[in-house]
Amino acid sequence: MSVRWDPFQNVVTLSEAVNRLMQDAVMRPGYALAQAGEAPMNIVERNDAYFIQVALPGVHAEGVELTTQHNTVTIKAHRDNPLPQMAGTEHLGYLLAEFGAGDLMRTVTLPKEFQADKIEASLEWGILTIKVPIADRAQPKRITVVEGSQAAREIAAAGANSAH
């Protein structure tokens, strides 16, 4: 008996694709980006600093490791079993387990240079908040423009000298 190959068996209908897109983008915005072993994250940029928030339910501050290298921040965390030991009871198994014990890691590369020695981090109610100050030299600077400066005369003189 031969099985006939159907080239359309794995094709997703437009309706199914739109439904999946809407579910990921509207019903759970941002969470579709976090893979297994990662924690959901928010990053906000202000003029002077980045603010990173990472959801780490059940993690204690001593279970968090924060490192930087170049423009990259890496957050590693360990979460112990979230359920207390059930002494004297028979554990039959989870009905649903979306988070449990294990290691989590997120790495983010920030677009601007930052001051690693001035980073501050705190963990409260399962949310790790990290303030990452942007380096002074990476922040925008306003340049004052004046009429008839010495620089314009120097450029004109340099041009006249190179013509000879």
Image (cartoon, rainbow, N blue to C red):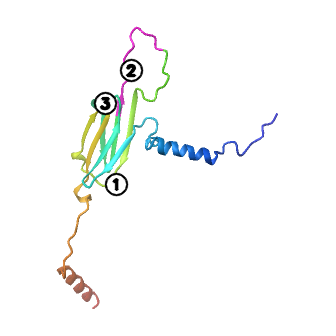
In this orientation, which residue lies closer to the viewer: 137 or 19?
Answer: 19
Image side of residue 89 versus residue 44, left or right: right
Label 2 packing within 10 angstroms: few (<14), some (14-19), many (20+): few
Q: Which mark is residue 139?
A: none
Q: Which residue is mark 2?
A: 83
x, y percent for residue 43: 34, 47
Query: How far, Cα to Cα, is label 2 from label 1?
Result: 39 Å
Instruction: Pick the quarter of the image with the N terminus.
Output: top right
Q: Which residue is mark 1?
A: 111
Q: Amino acid at mark 1?
A: Pro
In this orientation, which residue lies closer to the viewer: 31 or 76?
Answer: 31
Label 1 packing within 10 angstroms: few (<14), some (14-19), many (20+): few
* Residue 20 sits above or below residue 159 on the image: above
Q: Which residue is mark 3?
A: 63
Q: Which residues are magenta?
A: 77-91
x, y percent for residue 73: 33, 45
Q: Amino acid at mark 2?
A: Leu
| Element marked by disc 1 | loop
| Element marked by disc 2 | loop
Image side of residue 94 versus residue 126, left or right: right
